Image (spheres, helix red, strand yellow):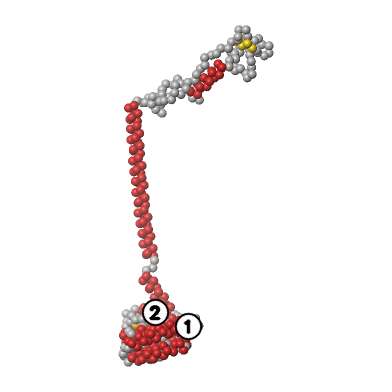
Amino acid sequence: MSRFSALLLLGLAATATAQNPYISDAGAVRPVPPGYSPATGEAGGVLDVKPGGVDRRPTVAETPTPTTASSYTGGSGGYSLMTPPMNPYMYNPWGMRQDPMNGYLTGVASVTTATGQYWNQIEQARLVREESRRSSFETTKQQVELQRWYEAQKPKTQDLIDAAVRDDLERARRDPPPTEVWSGKSLNALMNNILKSPRPTSGPQIPLAEDVVRGLNLVDKSSRGDLSLAKDEGKIAWPESLQEEMFDGPRDRFTKMFGQAMGQVNAGEMPDFKLVREMRKDLKEMETRLEDQVEKISAGAYLSGRRVINQLKTQVAGLSDPAVVKSSRSWRNEVKTVADLVAQCQKGLSFGPSASPGDERAYTAAYYALRNYERDMAQLARR
């Protein structure tokens, strides 16, 4: 309890005693009970009747001087209860006595300390920022190293190409599916490995029959056209789907013009350009009519007709290419053995797919002859 609270309670107690006096023999002051009416004596005093037959003596009430409790006066002087005014320059919260100059120096010291702490925190923040930057650079370096390692482990494009070539060669050396032989894929895989040899034509003498050479289709790698049907003098095996009545007009015109163009090729001449242009128009017309029948004919009939039309497109493209025309009439007369066939492929020719019915037998025979030639060449290279 504070000094002010204690003095206030004492003052209130004194005031209450002065208003309701009741004095006993022992000198104690008691308040008058509620409803009590004391008897009044001759002298005008109050008679106190005590219980139990005790002798009663009159008493005279005296009104003491009331004591007024001190109050808070406010202001910078503090409290007025026997407490001297507080001088802010004489005392501080730590109980140290100081004068105005000492307080000024203390404030300057506090400002200096706060300034030092501020710059210390600034420098610590700079160090943390630099550490963050250093960590960022280290992370970037590790990312670059990881990407470099990943690129080193990832196969290169040339590695994938070489792997595909090796796979095709191994597949061709073993018995591949007939479709890969008839499409020329297996023959080209063996031929490409033979051409990598320093002397590809120095292999064993393996003869090729005339009908086998006639059934082969060598195409120029630099051109999308070929003249595989030149060996049959322009004869075309039309499928059943293209022998319907709606195809009679364009089919008959194309057959006639194609025979004339192949005759010019076999005679060593380039086909007439107008003739080639009309053949393209007839093929376009047959293609449009075949597309109109796609929902009316079977899937097999549609695919056979589409295959022949696409094949004839390559034949027409070959008729307008002088290099294709020249190679189509010369290479068959020069091929007698597998070595001769290799020599023709050295000039830029490769195996195209079988074009005419019955050519599959010629491709199968040429495959086995070429596989034996490549195997002997590989054995000579290992010696």
Q: Residue at x 47, y 21 (%)?
A: 70
Residue beneath disc 2: 189
Image x and y of residue 163, in percent: 39, 73
**Which numbered mark, 2 or 1, is in the foreground of this view?**
1
Count of numbered marks: 2
Q: CA distance from mark 2 to mark 1?
A: 39 Å
Instruction: Decide: few, some or many residues near mark 1? Use Cα within 10 Å; few <14, some 14-19, many ≥20.
Output: few
Image x and y of residue 173, in percent: 42, 80
**Residue 372 appears in which quarter of the rendering?**
bottom left
Question: What's under tag 1, amino acid-wise?
Answer: Gln
- Compared across the picture, whether 84 is left or right of 24 comes to left
| Residue found farthest to the top | 43
Q: Is residue 378 above or below residue 137?
A: below
Q: Is residue 297 above or below residue 125?
A: below
Is residue 339 visible to us here?
Answer: no
Q: Is residue 174 above or below residue 91?
A: below
| Residue found farthest to the right | 53
Give the quarter of the figure containing the C terminus: bottom left
Is residue 180 visible to us here?
Answer: yes
Q: Secondary structure at mark 1?
A: loop
Image x and y of residue 274, in percent: 33, 87
- Compared across the picture, whether 104 is left or right of 289 comes to left
Q: Nearer the viewer, residue 43 or 356?
A: 43
Question: What's under tag 2, amino acid-wise?
Answer: Ala
Q: Residue at x 51, y 17 (%)?
A: 67
Q: Nearer the viewer, residue 279 or 151?
A: 279
**Residue 353 appears in which quarter of the rendering?**
bottom left
The reply to whether callout 2 and callout 1 are in contact (CB within 8 Å) is no
**Residue 93 appears in which quarter of the rendering?**
top left
Residue beneath disc 1: 293
- Compared across the picture, whether 72 is left or right of 46 comes to left
